[in-house]
Amino acid sequence: MPAAIAALGSWPAVLLAGPAGPGDLPAARAQMGFSLAWHIIVACLGVGLPALTLLAEWLGIRREDPALKLLARRWARAMGVLFAVGAVSGTILSFEMGLLWPGLMGRFGQVIGLPFALEGIAFFIEAIFLGIYLYAWDRLPPRRHLLTGIPIVVAGTASAFFVVCANAWMNQPRGYTLRDGKVVHVDPWAAMLNPASPPQTVHMILAAFMVASFLTASVYAVALLRGRRDAYHRAGFAIPFTLGAVVAPFQIVVGDWAARFLSDYQPVKLAAIEGVYHTGSHIPLTVGGVAGDNGLQYGLEVPDGLSLLVGYRTDTVVKGLDQVPRNQWPAVTGVHWAFDLMVACGFFMLGLGVWLLLAWWRTRRSGGGLLDRRDSGGGLLDRRGSRLLLALVALAGPASVVALESGWSVTELGRQPWIVYGVMSVRDAVNPAPGLMTGLWLVLAVYAAMTVATVYVLRRLARGTAVPVAPQEADVRDYPVV
Amino acid sequence: MLVDTALAVMWAGLTCYALFAGADFGAGVWDLFAGGASRGARQRRVIEHSIGPIWEANHVWLIFVIVLLWACFSPVFAAVMSTLYVPLTLAALGIIARGAAFAFRKVSTELWQQRLFGAFFALSSLLTPFFLGAVAGGVASGRVPAGLAEGDVITSWLNPTSALGGALAVLTCAHLAAVYLCADVARDGDAELARAFARRAIATGLASGAVALAGTAVLHADAPALFHGLTHRALPLVVLSAVSGVAGLALLATRHYLAARVAAALAVAAILWSWGAAQYPAMLVGSLTASQSASQPPVLSACLISLACGAALLIPSLWLLYATFQRANTSEPEHPPA
């Protein structure tokens, strides 16, 4: 018994036993990767969902449509929950930057501090107006209430821009000079607005709108498939689907820009993405495959495809992984597959957008609206094949998340083994303290609980019948469905 | 000059975090002690109403402080985060649990869910300020040397000064919350509940004072440099804190709730600034000063200019937020027709 008590008393020593072990670096990477992968979904919803909600509210006010007004209130409630978990999971990331990567922050914190300071301001504005928007729904006249939502969208987009600027800096470190290992001549603006910032930020912001749109649309696609075909569910499907369909083609173009950017600025990442081992011309585009000793094996090859994509000519020279020593190669199979997965999901969503465009064109010609019911001419959802479309959109929600996560994996894994491309390795940045493995398990447990609770609460919100006066005033019970 | 300005702005941010978000944590502590589901329902509703619209904005002050610390004093950030990563991880998890559970409880309708989420919300409201206070104690007592994880991973936060910091943080948060809630409840016309919160505010105020007094002995033994600073250069601020603390208690007893808010806030702010004044210019006692650890001037000025521009947007926005929700709820129609 005394031994047990002694063991209890020394638990911190047990968990943090000895110096940092070989498992601590993978643990730190896993923890960072996991909490980022979690946050990125919620953050995308935090950027995109307010836009959808405002769109529904605006249309509802303009058309005096109770279904649209109810939709806006429902979405606002989900927004309140998602924003809260997004705010706290984002805070954890700012902690983890120091807890896990003090080597990076100690040396380069001042170089990438500015975008984070600006992000803090943007996030502050977002939080302030979210509080007003959610809680003052019926304290303000409708149009003024609508106006209080606009800063949420603007500031949310700005937050995404600033944070991704900091990530872009890790790919294209600029705005400082290293002299004897010390950082001098810092130009924080040049660091923030580095060459990778434009393609990365635009790609990310569009991704946020696509994820929010397709995820929301997929929820209502499922409801419509189950036969709930009232105006409320039709609008809940059509508004986000339209927004997502509009964004999708732009995202494909921006994605091409982002990849082309790599061929000039970060050729190793592009080489890993496409599995190009040896520099050369007439490089094929390989879909799928496994990284072997001498190149991708078992993949589907399009002759000269990559050379054509990069330089529009079959003899364009593409730099291969052989420009750097093998111990500086990213994990080729993982990066390559993540990229292919992202592209596949992207084109899937683009295809759905084309479908919507064709349907829109046909209903226009027959004089109906997309959302009209069968008895007034037949809209999108009463045509032949509409069940197939709904099923595909239901899939597009998860597909948008897959595209998001795999695209993000390409950016991060493609940079390995560097935390700051070509300057500092991940190994040199990690916290040398013992016990990071324990931290990983703790964080995993907390996030698992938070995931279960978030999904459960959101599902309940979707099923709830009464919608309170202001979306966050939960204590009002007897409010009728509008 | 630039360094001192950055430091002052950061400390002002920390003060705002303590005064606003600290009270939100404190409200969670009172939620914890509000009693059973039916007895505590009224109090919990009041707490939810007061902090619901504003806690996220208040929480941002923490991000503000963290970001300024890493942008303007990167080596300090790296040293503190790497050595004190255990309490900071626990505080981070507490922040997650607090925020998420509060949002979840708000939209839950069944009692067992409200209980479950409420328990997480309230318990993490107690633990998070404790760990943050322990971190402050570790830094203030000079247990965080410069460099990466150079300090002891355990004793840097399991030590007398950290215990004092943690206890003081919890007590002052609870005190601030009770004082703020008095005025909120009184404005809504519930004099009885206002008096109940006033009693709690007085009790926690007295407890904070007692702990602070006992704490001087702890600091004398455990953190002599800090003790010397507090009893010399920072003495006026220490006295200011004590005086406004006592004045706040008197104002509470005489039911001047709004004035008591100001006094309580001043007392807490003065504690923070006395700590800052006592250890200035050291950032990490014994190893790094502000000017040694400061970022280069272009970084400091870029951050300060951005913040000044940001403040031009933020101050009117914050004013709008507080103005919208500090207006009396009672004048609102309870259930407007659909």
Image (cartoon, coloured by chain):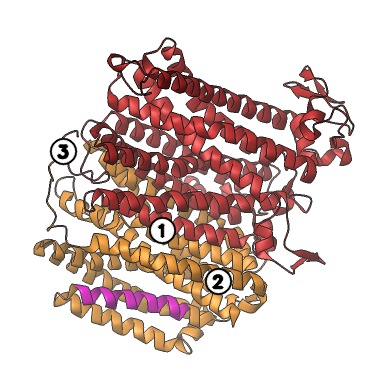
Task: Indicate the amino acid at tag 3.
Answer: Tyr
Q: Between tags 1 and 2, which lies in front?
A: 2
Pinpoint residue A398: horizontal percent, then vertical percent.
50, 26
The residue wearing badge 1 is B59
Q: Chain of mark 3?
A: A
Q: Residue at x 23, y 35 (%)?
A: B110
Could you tell me which secondary element the residue under label 2 belongs to?
Answer: helix
Q: What residue span does the magenta drawing correspond to?
A: B258-275
Task: Indicate the amino acid at tag 2.
Answer: Ile
Closer to the camera in the image, A286 or A90? A286
**Circle 3 crowding by C-alpha within 10 Å: few under 14, some 14–19, many from 20:** some
Q: Between tags 2 and 3, which lies in front?
A: 2
Q: Give the alpha-carbon distance from disc 1 to disc 2, as whole Å.
A: 22 Å
Q: Colour of chain B?
A: orange
Q: Give the alpha-carbon distance from disc 3 to disc 1, as whole Å.
A: 31 Å
Q: Residue furthest top?
A: A384
Q: Colour of chain A?
A: red
Q: Residue at x 42, y 45 (%)?
A: A85
Q: Give the alpha-carbon distance from disc 2 to disc 3, as whole Å.
A: 48 Å
Q: Residue at x 59, y 44 (%)?
A: A202
Is disc 3 on the same chain as disc 2? no
Q: Is residue B267 magenta?
A: yes
Could you tell me which secondary element the residue under label 1 belongs to?
Answer: helix
Marks 1 & 2, CB-CB < 8 Å contact: no
The residue wearing badge 2 is B305
Residue A394 visible: no
Pinpoint residue B260: horizontal percent, then vertical percent.
23, 75
- In the picture shown, does residue B65 fall above or below A328? below
Q: Tag on residue A479? A: 3
Closer to the camera in the image, A126 or A108? A126
